[in-house]
Image: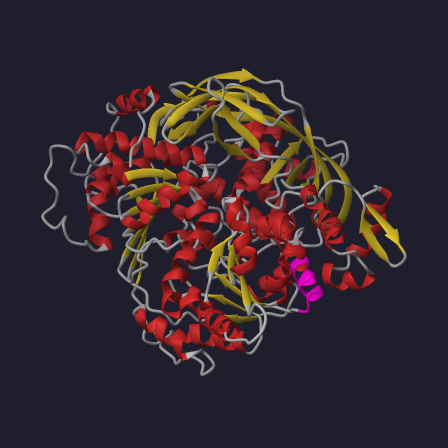
Amino acid sequence: MAFNHLPAGVHDALSALSVTPVTHSMPMASDPLPPDAGTRPSPGMILDRLTRGATRAARITHTEHLPPRTGSHADWPTRIRPEVIGAIRSAGIDRPWAHQARTSEHALRGESVVVATGTASGKSLAYLAPVLSTLLDGSEAPNGRGTTALYLAPTKALAADQRRAVRALAAPLGTAVRPAVYDGDTPVEEREWVRQYGNYVLTNPDMLHRGILPAHPRWSSFLRALRYVVIDECHTYRGVFGSHVAQVIRRLRRVCARYGSAPVFLLASATAAEPARAATLLTGLDVAEITEDTSPRGELVFALWEPPLTELHGEQGAPVRRTATAETADLLTDLTVQDVRTVAFVRSRRGAELIALIAQERLAEVDRSLPSRVAAYRGGYLPEERRALERALHSGELLGLAATTALELGVDVSGLDAVVIAGYPGTRASLWQQAGRAGRSGQGALAVLVARDDPLDTYLVHHPEALFDQPVESTVLDPDNPYVLAPHLCAAAAELPLTEADFTLFGPAAAGLLPQLETAGLLRRRATAWHWTRRERAADLTDIRGQGGSPVQIVEAGTGRLLGTVDAGAAHTTVHDGAVHLHQGRTYLVRHLDLEDDVALVEEANPPYSTTARDTTAVSVLETDTEIPWGDARLCFGSVEVTNQVVSFLRRKLISGEVLGETKLDLPPRTLRTRAVWWTVTEDQLDAARVNPEQLGGALHAAEHASIGMLPLFATCDRWDIGGVSVPLHPDTLLPTVFVYDGHPGGAGFAERAFHTAADWLTATRDAIASCECDAGCPSCIQSPKCGNGNDPLHKRGAIRLLTELLRGAVA
């Protein structure tokens, strides 16, 4: 696999780093590999090598050892066809784990079920055994197409991987099982074959929403015979995306009923709190749950890693830690040198590209053959690029991979020895999902969480009990969100005219929305049904990923070549004029963002910096749903309108993050109606907290930043899913006020979760600020990477006193 040259800026940054104390402590170019390098080392041994030297060892704040676990077998249900059991045995599996057998029993009885067990616990086989058996039964039917099954995955990579697995497992069954992928990458000439002959169709919710349901008459024979719907990695369907998928599934059930079928839903999830409740919200059906994991597990060594402080200073003179990007690139390099198969999970596309680039540069100094063994993997690549990387990963050609969450899910990457996680991924469920990618063949594994310079990450590496002694989060979604429900009612009406009988399926909010859709001219009532009467496709009214609008195409200005795409909602912050864009090892500068044509024109360049957008935000209260007194303070939840505008971008040095300058931008403001939690304090409380008027703005601002950073610990969100505003005198409340809001139209359930856990959430926020070792505030406690005001003003001690006073009257 070939990789392109490195940008000059990366070379410059690496050269600059060579004079700092944060250098490799592993054997590098001139050092021989350890004598046991040719054997598979234990996870403890791998970690020992990574932490050689005093500076490296000091970065470990905690090590958790999860002991191996023995498995518990059972027998397959008697209704599983012997041919299927024989195929499973041919794959080397003599008997199922007990949770696999129990899941199959529910499926065969026609009961929807969710299996929520650990990573690599065999969830796929738990639903495949009854599905394959039923497909085999159907292939022997004297008339008609036979039985069919539909598989839904949140990513294309997972669907492609599952097709490989199904083909291999079902090979002894001949043509009775015909798996086929139907997604945006499926060639047009293959799609008709899939519709006519595929009986195990693998797709994603996006294609179901836009491609299959609007064309349901062409799928009528498939839908008429549909017995099972498999929803894999269902814990990923949360927030706005999960709410959209819940309505897509209701539309699927409605169309199936039109053709006389009522499929059983089989869901698979990482370990999650209340999986049956989440699965019921998602499907609208009663769902049984299987949560006892009876599979064996190898030893897992989980290390928490905090990068050291550097001599650099950031905004307002705050101390700066070495970036998680630089630390992760070091670890990926060192693990590759050790011949340790590793995936480094990175939160951003740009971060994945940069880590791969740095690792390739450093590996070239060790062995010229090693850089080709490391690559980046992320969304936005063209289909042929993704497939090539997936093949290289499966073949073992790639030894190290810097990946976004596109590879977090159940893609089979068996053989991995280690996982490095660059920054807390937002939820404990995702953390364990990513850590579980290693050790999937039953061997021991190492996981390392590298903390970013961020309040939550810093809190977690110094409070390991918040990770290892707490259950995973409940899945948060709201299918009744009117901004979600309304376009799906239109899509459903375009598929089949809506009647009052459908209200039960779509939820109690449907009846109230239909008159509004009539008034807007989107639906027309005729007799007892509502019809879609416009020329446009109703399914195009919404993007179920919650971004809104058409994706922005990234085009090379000189050649017209399409490099990839970026979601419309992210375009203002990622491909604005002057933004640095990384793609497959090459660096580009955005010359112009055309918002009318949804195109970003880029040119190849080698800038020695990265870019970060800055924005300003204002909030107005539309309606207060709930208000709770906390002494004299008030905690509120309701609807707000947010006005946001990207106003500038910062240029930062690669690796170190040092700010080089700021450039103004002229982009239009965007408005958002959403849900928020907010709290107010009184003048008497400010006096009690010893927060004077000069300190007030900084204290509120600091509390807002830190509370946004800490909310992902209490709600299944990422800090980039939420926003905040703090105002010393807000015009709607007439008091000092801090808002935290959902960053999606209509809300995503995160602010509501914050409202209900406010006492614990804000207590953790205060503790995180107070325990930070800095003097006046830093990115580890109160500074925010997306602050539109340059992290000014901020007052650390004022925030601690203010939150302490607020919490005196808190209602738990």
Q: Is residue 254 left or right of residue 56?
A: right
**Residue 252 screen position, x and y as percent:** 65, 59
Q: Position of residue 788 (x, y in %)?
A: 58, 26
| Quarter of the N terminus within the rendering | top left
Query: In the rendered view, how is the structure colored?
Result: secondary structure
Residue 513 in the image, given as x and y percentages of width and height: 80, 50
Q: Which residues are magenta?
A: 251-260
Q: Quadrant of residue 311?
A: top left
Where is residue 503? Give x, y as percent.
78, 61
The foreground one among 580 and 277 is: 580
Q: Residue at x 30, y 57 (%)?
A: 439
The stretch drawn in magenta includes residue 255? yes
Q: Residue furthest right?
A: 527
Q: Is residue 663 above or below residue 455?
A: above
Q: How many marks?
A: 0
163 in magenta? no
Q: Is residue 366 above or below residue 229?
A: above
Relative placement, left or right, of 293 versus 54 is right
Q: Main secondary structure of the magenta part?
A: helix
